[in-house]
Amino acid sequence: MSEKKNFRKFLLLWSGELVSSIGGGLTSFGLGVYVFRETGSASGTALVTLLGFLPTLLLSVPSGVLADRYDRRLLMMIGDGCSALGVLYILFCMLRGSASLTQICIGVSFSAVFSALLEPSYRATITDLLTKEEFSRANGLISLAGSARYLFSPVIAGFLIAISDIKLLLVIDVCTFFLTILSAAVVRKGLNAKPAEKREAFFQSMKEGWRVLRRKKGLLPLVALSSAVTLFMGILQVLEKPLILSFADETTLGIAETVCACGMLISGVILGFKGLKGHYVRTLGLALMLCGVFMFGFSLFENIFIVCAFGFLFFATLPFANNCLDYLARTNIPDEAQGRVWGMIGFISQLGYVVAYGVCGAAADLLGKVLDCGVGRGAAMVVMIGGVLLAVTATFVWIPKSIRELENN
């Protein structure tokens, strides 16, 4: 009975994150379109994405330590609530006339600083609530919630922009923060926080997360591999808007992103009900290789139907890779170190995003200018190169014996 009750609490917490993901997706879509239309370059869009992501990355490790030392549900509530202030700042600037690129970067960065508190606490809370046997099914639902910003948000945002403007999207996003705080508060009631067994110094706790990661043979190579994967994923994430907007309007962009993300919805539902029963390493390598192939096809032609077809296949394959990565890592981390290690894993694995956000926008602009084909086709060329490299990188999943042995545990 207790396990069923905890799974219901997980579903409540997951529902809050689902709503938050949709709201965040509205803001992300709106700001991406706004900045690209204002600047006419992929670099501006990439800069906003980078500054919205970098604080979360840099603070992921200390946030993991906090998740092991303090009430994880309270940290989630603080992170969600304060991150809304950054969105409110951008909204205020727009209500006064228009928001400059600098003002948008400030607001997005501020929001990201407090969002950093959320991820390690959220993942560690899932470990608090669920049994090992429930992890795989929960991972499918988590992937589904993460995909909501790609599945529901774009088509909603495209429709709302057509009848209003970006300010409406920001208002809706701010409202979603209250719902997520409420769900975390309900889960917190009746669920005792797990105090750390050792009251180590703060930086000593950070070092302990690194030591746990290194001690488990195969875990660090797996995390390093995931960092290479996020590099290629980040390329597609940043350049899909300039690529599509070069030959379509905002409404078409929203519909296309939603159609593509339907692949993640279908896979997430399948994994949520059935999960994976084994062969995690083999499935991981195959899924990443297919992601690379579909990423290449995504950028071949300026045809919205081809873009949607390959985008759908890409997102349908991605949850299988994420599920395997999450399971292999989660089942090899001691319960008492979940927050610290997930913070360290988040930091290392997402370094690839920093490189992608910092380089791919400028690369797309440069290729478009040098080859005189425009920023849209320049973005397409960068995406194709990323797809090829991702498919090649996927083969390295099967080589290290230490990674294969993680599955036996």
Image (cartoon, helix red, strand yellow):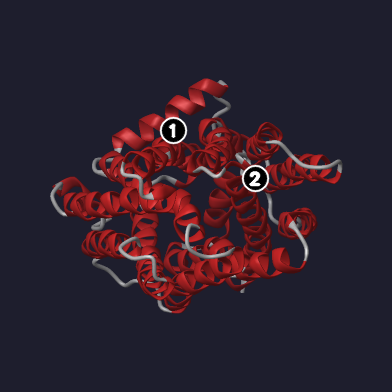
**Residue in front for this viewpoint, 295 or 131:** 295
Residue drawn at (65%, 36%) of the image = 101
Q: Nearer the viewer, residue 335 or 361?
A: 361
Label 1: element kind: helix
User: What percent of the width, then of the height, locates residue 284?
Assistant: 27, 60
Percent across and percent down for residue 269 are: 48, 77
Q: Which mark is residue 379?
A: none
Question: Is 212 drawn above or below residue 188 in the view shown?
Answer: above
User: In the image, residue 361 lies at what x, y percent?
Assistant: 44, 41
Amino acid bearing label 1? Gly
Point out which mark residue 209 bears: 1
Q: Quadrant of the N terminus?
A: bottom right
Q: Residue 30's spot in the image, x, y percent?
A: 65, 55
| Label number found at residue 72 | 2
Query: Is any atom of residue 295 visible in this view?
Result: yes
Q: Quadrant of residue 70?
A: top right
